[in-house]
Amino acid sequence: GGSIGLSVAGLASAGLVPFLQWRMRVAMRRCVALMEVALRREKPDVVVGSSWGGAVALKCIEQGYWAGPAVLLAPAISARGVWNLAWPSFEPELPAAAAARVLVVQGDRDDTVPFERVDDLCRRKGLRLEVVEGGDHRLVGAMLGPTERLAQLVRDEYQSSAPSPSIS
């Protein structure tokens, strides 16, 4: 049996890149619509999203469906390699008050979402950034397991956004 090769040139010449980009935009819109309903129904204290989920959370913030707090792990605002054909970069427009309630966690060795793009976005939009030195796209070793770092970040975000008890 033969093998089927997938090349960038082959995708482009077959006209599949615009189709893939359209499918990704449709999928994103559908995920954002589902999240809008879930956010209204569930009223979470903190939204946590990783990769695609981080991009969905950013779109929800951009569209006013969520105002934070949020912890986003390697949000897919851009992609490397062949993935960049299907998922072109985007830059969300975020209200300053909501942006201040977003913590982005990004590995500096992410092989899927370019660290430089995330770092730049965080600086320009006022998002807080925690860099995981040596962290890849999955961030599993740094966020889960014995360190329980992710759980601590979520607790911290919740506590920093919880209303202060009123004195009566």
Image (cartoon, grey):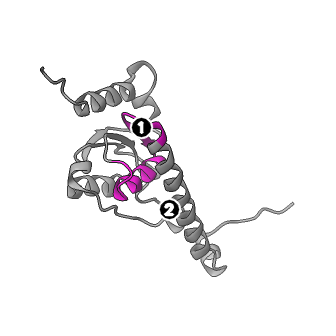
**Quadrant of the snapshot with the C terminus:** top left
Q: Which mark is residue 69?
A: none
Q: Residue furthest right?
A: 1
Are circles 1 and 2 on residues that touch, CB within 8 Å? no
Secondary element at tag 1: loop
Whether the magenta-drawn stretch holds residue 138 is answered as: no
Residue 163 x %, y %: 22, 30
Residue 81 x %, y %: 50, 62
Whether the magenta-drawn stretch holds residue 60 is answered as: yes
Q: Is residue 109 visible?
A: yes
The amino acid beneath tag 2 is Gly
For marks 1 and 2, the one nearer the N-term is 1
When the figure is inspected, residue 165 is found, relative to residue 14, above or below; the finding is: above
Q: Which residues are magenta?
A: 41-66
Q: In the image, what residue occupies the spot 47% across and 52% down?
A: 112
Q: In the image, what residue occupies the spot 36% across and 26% down?
A: 149
Q: Is residue 52 visible?
A: no
The amino acid beneath tag 1 is Lys
Residue 111 x %, y %: 45, 50
Q: Quadrant of residue 153?
A: top left
Q: Which residue is mark 1?
A: 43
Of circles 1 and 2, which is in front? Answer: 1
**Quadrant of the snapshot with the N terminus:** bottom right
When the figure is inspected, residue 8 is found, relative to residue 107, above or below; the finding is: below
How many badges with numbers are in the image?
A: 2
Q: In the image, what residue occupies the spot 38% across and 45% down?
A: 109
Q: Which mark is residue 81?
A: 2
Q: Nearer the viewer, residue 96 or 18?
A: 96
Q: Is disc 1 surrounded by few (<14), some (14 to 19) or many (20+) residues within 10 Å?
A: few
Q: Nearer the viewer, residue 130 or 112?
A: 130
Secondary element at tag 2: loop
